[in-house]
Amino acid sequence: MVGRGGSFRSGTSDVSDDSVSDADVPRTVTFFEGPPAPGDVPARLASPFDPGPPGPLARRSAEALQQRLHQERARWESLWRPGGGKMFGVLVVEAPGGRLGSLCAFSGMLEGAWNVEGFVPPLFDAAAREAFWPAGEAELAVLEQRHAQALHEASREPRMAARRECEARLADIAHLRAERSRELWRRMAHCYVIPNARGERLPLAALFAPQPPPGGAGDCAAPKLLAFAYRHHLKPLALAEFWWGASPLKGTRRSGAYYPACDSKCGKLLPYMLEGLAVEPAPPRPVAILEEPRVLHEDPWLLVIDKPHGLPCVPGRHSPARDSVLVRLQRRFPELSSSLFVHPLEPESSGLVLLARDSATQASLQRQFARREAEHRHVAWVDGLLGGEHGSVELALRGTSTGALEVLADGLHGKRAVTEWRVCGASDARTRVLLWPRTRHPLQLRIHTAHPLGLGAPLVGDVRFGREDTRLMLHAEGLGFTHPRTGVRLDFDSPAPF
């Protein structure tokens, strides 16, 4: 039986229970030294997605681990380097015989190691991984060297024709590297078999099908802890995850602060792993109430809209009723269709959007942009300081929005894409820039800012090519064109919300 006390005792020593031998309980369990206070043992496991504070036993376990990490700070030096912190987790468990203790885990690797004494092991089958991973990793290293060499050659080549040839070779290497990396991860995903409390097991890939699992799925602290507990017949009682070490380079996580399980990697994993346990229901997800798009100009031929961040311009081919600028506007203008957007914006960006009300008006407006008689000016923050004050990026792009950064920029098979830019400020290793896309391609501004042959500085908040932030710092602030029917020059401004 277990009760009060603030200290912990490791492993199988000093605990008397004739019904359980030392071999029945792994030494990774750290047992409470005394019984907990009445009411501290929860009747149901709290949802790992609950953003509230952990219960008393989970907090005691977490504070004990934090004290250990603090005392061994020199050993975990990399955690305190810029951006080096990571998530840790503790799981309070009931062992056979009724003893209560806790398990510890870290997300991913710690100091370059998957297995660290005192922490539960990774979830994957190490023997299966060893059969292919070293050779695959070596091949990726060779491709990385080839890519770096091609990038160096392309950056030093002054002649446009030769530069394009270098860019084509760079794109081919990047494409091969991306394919090999995806194949390696597909094979790696088969090494993860996910258990639940009922004793059932599913391959990791099955939980995310038909899409492949995201990179790092199964490597967070909570899945590691639950899998280890099930494997050793330990009943999960309470869970807590916290950040330890330096804050992320972009983000607000603080050392010692508690955070709920992530949705991107654990949103499909943990609900399955918890089947068969008594678990508190997950809190309802907050529903984002998006602003209404503002109509800045309306006439029989066209509309100018100020689009809020987070709202798509069009609903998507397979979800015609999905909330979007178009669906909302169709309540007032039922004749509108997705094909009449002159230059739609991405959902994560915001600002001025031009929408024709008939195909002839749309064609006339598009001709103005092609001849540079019309302009669409964006303002953005990019992650890094730029070497110049203004310039132009000319980097051909494939006509797709899927693939790695290097694959999307393709000097051999891509279409010409041009973005002009000018610096208008800088702060905290970030640069504020004005961007004028002179062509229109999927993700053009994202790729031209992030790619090494472009600005080499991804947009702040670009989770695909850069780092997460409060939002994508990209806003269409200026729009100017000549009205196709009246001949009047129209100019619109929308101040950036950042």
Image (cartoon, rainbow, N blue to C red):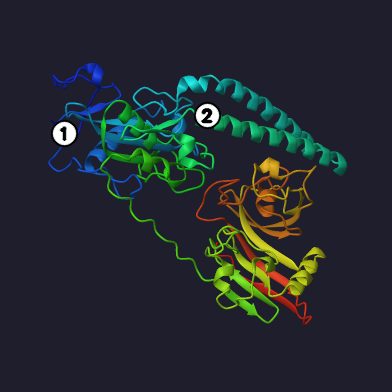
Mark 2 is on which residue type? Met
In depth, the one of 393 and 181 nearer the eye is 181
Q: Name the residue beneath numbered marker 2.
A: 188
Badges 1 and 2: C-beta atoms under 8 Å apart? no
Q: Residue at x 18, y 20 (%)?
A: 20
Asked if residue 424 lies left or right of residue 40, the reply is right
Instruction: Work out whether 256 lies above or below 367.
Output: above
* Percent of width and height locating residue 221: 39, 35
Tally of numbered discs: 2
Asked if residue 196 lies left or right of residue 168, the reply is left
The N terminus, quarter of image: top left
Residue 182 seen in the figure: yes
Asked if residue 473 lies left or right of residue 81, the reply is right
* Percent of width and height locating residue 220: 42, 36
Q: Name the residue beneath numbered marker 1.
A: 5
* Percent of width and height locating residue 129: 51, 23
In terms of secondary structure, where does tag 1 sit?
A: loop
Q: Quadrant of residue 476?
A: bottom right
Q: Quadrant of residue 484?
A: bottom right
> Upstream in the sequence, badge 1 or badge 2?
1
Q: Residue at x 87, y 42 (%)?
A: 161
- Between the residue at mark 1 and the residue at mark 2, the CA separation in whole angstroms equals 43 Å
Mark 1 is on which residue type? Gly
